[in-house]
Image (cartoon, helix red, strand yellow):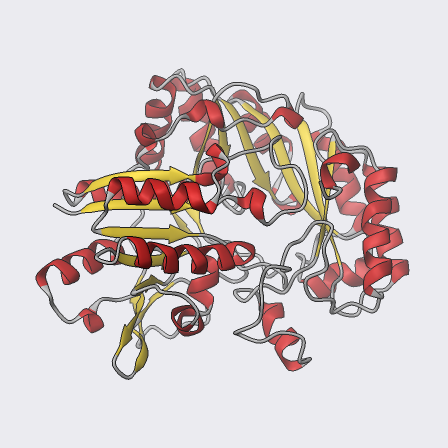
Amino acid sequence: MARFTLINPNDAACYKFSRARSRKIPLGQAYIAAALQRAGHSVCVLDASADDLSQDEIVKRVIDTQPDFAGIGGTTPLYSQMSSLSKRIKETVPRATVILGGPHVSALPVPSLDTSAADFICIGEGEESIVAIVDSVINKTDPSKIPGIAFKSSTGGVVTKKYRLRLNQPVQSTIRAVDLDVCPIPARELYDHNKYVDHGRGIVSAQTGAMFSRGCPGKCAFCGAAETLVRWRHLDNVIAELEQIQAMGIPNLFVMDDTYTNQKKRVLELSKRIVERGIKLNISVQLRLDQVDEEICDAMYASGVKYVGPGIESGSERIMKAIGKGPRESRKHMREKIKLLKQYDWIIRCSYVFGMTGETEKDIMETIEFAQELGANESAFSILTPYPDSPLWDVALKLGKVDEYMDFDRFLYYHTVGCNISEVPTDRLLQLHELAYTTVKSTSYTLHTLRPK
């Protein structure tokens, strides 16, 4: 048995606005913890965001736990923290094997090995590969046969055969993705769910997250999930997890699927089972407007859905097409579907993004005006950032605006322009971002939460 410490860095250290209003369980970390526990290992989790820990405090806790392995996960804005933590852990607990995971290092495995003190990187889903890494280190075997990892060798970074998670990956050179029904249910018992609340949306009691599927059929150019293979868990597996959540006394659930409404028949059946099994949870979902109708809305409402998050992205039909929105997603269509959603006692959060390639100030003003017209309970405006796992990363590379070894600290999406690929000057883009929040009502994203402290 090995001792493992899993670390979720503190996002308050990189985001320049208040995050106290919304905190969500690091679900990927909880999945990894469950996989390690099932393999017989001892796991300690550190959620530095939930506990608002500094790097010094994180390192002290790692020293106190004296792990054999330390795993650090995070997104692109958190990468400098991940790199720094890996180096400090190696200095203070030199015997610990350090493993990094998450979308950033998965997209840039070799640069991440080069700029951190990590021994290994899990590429993509890590439930199987992290257990195999532990076995390899303990038994001193060759890790090159482990799929979905990168590691340091005497000749440099080595990347092994990847899992097949995207539509464009050839079958011959990839490994079939993890079976979601074989993955253990996340190790929620390791977390204090009372820390995961969302005051801006009125969620002041314990909240957790879950994923019923992985992947998204959408082709949004700014998204790391674009053109990923969609895989679903069996509904028996999902219901077992929902009953466990209810038994733990957690009343609020955020379903983290990229698109909850991908399969109408499945949503109808799941909603029916939730009602039949007497599961009473306040459920939040993300959906696509071209996938909803009155029947699916009735079913979701009956099953406990209280909060819906459609992605509008733009009020400019020209930019909608450039982003890659579905062929039916027009302004007219979105008006009709938002009108349908408003017939239910739901909190509606519409999300928008500014800064697409070729986008002008006129396009952005159309988006702000459209958001006002739709009148959702919440409107979230992001500044487009070409993250390394998104299709737009290659566009930004060709423009010479990014590189694999750049400083990613500025790669945020609120109140900061990490990489401007639009037609709008950066200063003006920030002004328009602020204008959106001053003119469009939003209970959770008011201007005072967005201004730097």
Residue 91 image offset from top left, x and y in percent: 32, 58
**Outermost residue, left side:** 139
| The C terminus - image quarter | top right
Quarter of the rendering containing residue 61 = top left
Residue 7 image offset from top left, x and y in percent: 38, 45
What residue is at 66 percent from the left and 61 percent from the top? 385
Whether residue 234 is visible, yes or no, is no
What residue is at 24 percent from the left and 52 percent from the top? 69
| The N terminus - image quarter | top left
| Relative vertical location of residue 61 with respect to residue 394 in this rendering, above or below | above
Closer to us: 422 or 59? 59
What residue is at 43 percent from the left and 31 percent from the top? 270
Left/right placement of residue 22 relative to residue 382 reads left
Residue 243 image offset from top left, x and y in percent: 34, 23
Closer to us: 225 or 126? 126
Left/right placement of residue 209 relative to residue 13 reads left
Quarter of the rendering containing residue 393 = bottom right
